[in-house]
Image (cartoon, coloured by chain):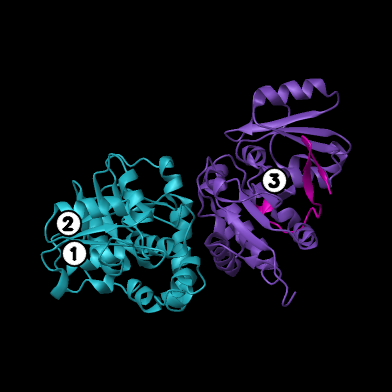
Chain colours: A cyan, B purple
Amino acid sequence: MTNVEKPSLEVCLSPALLHLYDTNDAVVVIIDIFRATSTITAALHNGARCVIPVASVAECITIGESLPGSITAGERDGKIAPGLQYGNSPLEYPAGFIKDKTLVLTTTNGTRLLHMVEGASSIVIGSFLNLGALCAYLLGQKKRVLLGCASWKDKFNLEDTLFAGAVATALQHDFEVKDDSARAAKHLYQCAQGNHLIEFLKDSSHYKRLSKYGLEHEMEYCVTPDLHPVVPYLKGREIVVY
Amino acid sequence: MTNVEKPSLEVCLSPALLHLYDTNDAVVVIIDIFRATSTITAALHNGARCVIPVASVAECITIGESLPGSITAGERDGKIAPGLQYGNSPLEYPAGFIKDKTLVLTTTNGTRLLHMVEGASSIVIGSFLNLGALCAYLLGQKKRVLLGCASWKDKFNLEDTLFAGAVATALQHDFEVKDDSARAAKHLYQCAQGNHLIEFLKDSSHYKRLSKYGLEHEMEYCVTPDLHPVVPYLKGREIVVY
């Protein structure tokens, strides 16, 4: 694209900053690497009929009861939440288990951000597991892009920002990288590429927190690119494959 | 400091995230590199009696009128604001001009953040111009530190974050670098050191905005370390030298 106005690409580092961005008619990418958006991507690529993201455990149970054959899942403090059946791990949903089932998933940060976005052209799910597929989708849409980091209770986190940096790097020639957040994300991604991403992330709040629960292997899985090349998007209350 | 619990060091990337941090009894550093905190540091090192930071042009005029011999200063959109006498540049206040005078300064982002902080042990002013002096002060206080980026209308900016990264890097052995914001700031500072800071910042929103007003030389001045080795702090409504 030369001599053509490029669509802009911005990065919102925390849901608490979302009001600073215009989401109208933009493609908004929800990013919650550890682990909601990784789990959603894996489950859908493995054949889940859809994922229904909900904010609370109670809502998860209610919706699960109303949908026979659905699976309720979610964690609090690294353990399956009381009343639910499964956890929030991309490795828990292989094709042999999840195919054609509905996954009702409660997560805190990712779900909250997803429900905050208004007026978007589309709301899609981003993770390293679908990095390439997501970038191809964004290129095809030719619309403004906002990469939204779910963060951790509104606090900036490294892993979501690194992923935003990976997308901004991949799309930098076709989009106008518009704000300093996107520039910083690109620089951080460049820093992290020198060693492996997971090595870079070992010195992060979330890695330290989740490794206390023995989840190192899962986090390594979550930062592996392109294992699940689908683009999940929000359609009504359901997340389905594009 | 071995086997002794180190005080924590955190970085708040935007005033819109300040509520996530506990400022009680912490040392809070206000950072507004382009250019409020650079100007305040330079004016005080050059002998200003004090700086009074105010939010609005009207307040600046009122206070200026009540203090004979004071100087009113502030810019809007890169020009001296109507009704005020001088601008927001560290180069405008050499000793021969500012010595023993009171500078009533209106800025938007820096002043707002400064007035938002509650319960702090002390509120001090940070800029590259006083980097070394500030770090020595923080080491001496042995208290929790919050580095507060004034940002630009609540949006993350590169130059304030880079400075936070410079401080976090200098203090990393004596403080516990606690959150991902501080880790990211350190990484960004490391990226920027490869070339000169100003080269790194040429691809930033603020640099692009201010260079339209021909302020490149000033911005280069603002990222030069240790030209004005004083530690300004807030005492009542005045900023004075520690």
Which subunit holds the residue at mark 2?
Answer: A
Residue A164 image offset from top left, x and y in percent? 38, 60
Residue A138, image x, y percentages: 25, 56
In the rendered structure, find residue A240 and report the number of the disc placed on it: 2
| Proximity of marks 2 and 1: CB atoms separated by less than 8 Å | yes
SS for dot 2: strand
Which mark, residue A44?
A: 1
State the SS at label 3: helix
Q: Amino acid at mark 2?
A: Val
Asked if disc 3 and disc 1 are in contact, CB closer than 8 Å, the reply is: no
Q: Is residue B116 above or below residue A128?
A: above
> Is residue A33 shown left or right of residue A206?
left
Alpha carbons under labels 3 and 2: distance apart:
49 Å
Question: Is residue A61 located in the magenta-colored stretch of the structure?
Answer: no
Task: Find residue A128 and report its image quarter.
Answer: bottom left
Pointer 3 and pointer 1 on the same chain: no
Q: Is residue A215 left or right of residue B27?
A: left
Q: Secondary structure at mark 1?
A: helix
What is the chain identity of the residue bearing mark 1? Answer: A
Residue at the image position 31 percent from the left and 46 percent from the top: A115
Q: Residue at x 40, y 61 (%)?
A: A160
As displayed, is residue B14 above or below residue B56? below
Give the extent of the magenta segment: B220-242
Q: Earlier in the sequence, mark 2 or mark 1?
A: 1
Identify residue for label 3: B37
Residue B55: quadrant of the picture: top right
Decide whether residue B222 is among the magenta residues. Answer: yes
Which of the two residues, B65 or A33, is positioned nearer the viewer here?
A33
- Give whichever of B45, B120 is nearer the camera: B120
Which quadrant does the N terminus of chain B fall into?
bottom right
